[in-house]
Image: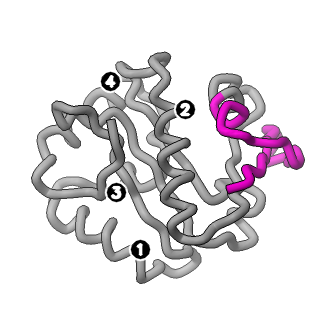
Amino acid sequence: MHLIQPTISLKAQYLDMLADWHQTGEDLVPFPIKYDPSNFEQMVNRLLEAQTIADEGFVCHSTFWLVNSDNKILGVSNLRHELNDHLLKEGGHIGYGIRPSERRKGYATSILRLSLLEAKKLNIKKVLVTCAKHNIGSAKTILKNGGRLWKEVDLNGETNQNYWIAN
């Protein structure tokens, strides 16, 4: 299992992952998997360009797919290269999600650990990761990767927990 950059060669696997997610009706996390895949090549190019060109109001970011030895996409992570005011409250440096059919297998811990290695390559020494307070699984994943609770933030009536991870 390892992280790869988005590639058009895994279109079928990506669409299969999205179908898995859509069957649950859950919110798509992290945000880049909300991008329209109907022109798959354009979507992949947009993800790759985001590493050096930020959309207005955003920061440069890298998206990675967690794949197994069969190139099945197990999850997606998004690494923001820096923090703006919004990300300092909600989102942090790393957002990640595991496709619903592959949860509770340790993949969230792995995708965060591997994403932290990518952050280290960008010389990010202190990584902010956030989650909703009610998301106990995500909090455990962050703690397993060295997270230390910094603060709780009220976001429209929901409590968000912000953790720092020394990298």
Instruction: State the CA–CA distance, disc 4 to disc 2.
Output: 24 Å
Q: Please tell me whether mark 4 sits on a helix, a strand or a loop.
A: helix
Q: Name the residue under label 1.
A: 51
Return the x and y of residue 157 as percentages of the image width and height.
Answer: 82, 40
Would you identify the image quadrant in which residue 46 lies?
bottom left
- Foreground label between 2 and 3: 2
| Left or right, residue 132 beside residue 22 | right
Question: Residues at badges 2 and 3 in contact (C-beta under 8 Å)?
Answer: no
Kind of residue indicated by mark 1:
Gln
Looking at the figure, which quarter contains the C terminus?
Answer: bottom right
Q: Please tell me whether mark 2 sits on a helix, a strand or a loop.
A: helix
Q: Is residue 152 magenta?
A: yes
Q: Is residue 61 above or below residue 151?
A: below
- Foreground label between 3 and 1: 1
Q: Residue at coordinates 45% horizontally, 21% vertically from top-left?
A: 103
| Left or right, residue 7 beside residue 166 | left
Q: Mark 4 points at which residue?
A: 23
Question: Residues at badges 3 and 1 in contact (C-beta under 8 Å)?
Answer: no
Label 1 crowding class (10 Å Cα cut-off): few <14, some 14-19, many 20+? some
Q: Mark 2 points at which residue?
A: 109
Instruction: State the CA–CA distance, disc 2 to disc 3.
Output: 25 Å
Question: Residues at badges 4 and 2 in contact (C-beta under 8 Å)?
Answer: no
- Work out whether mark 3 precedes mark 4 in sequence or the reverse, and give the earlier one: 4
| Left or right, residue 99 beside residue 144 | left
Kind of residue indicated by mark 2:
Thr
Q: Please tell me whether mark 1 sits on a helix, a strand or a loop.
A: loop
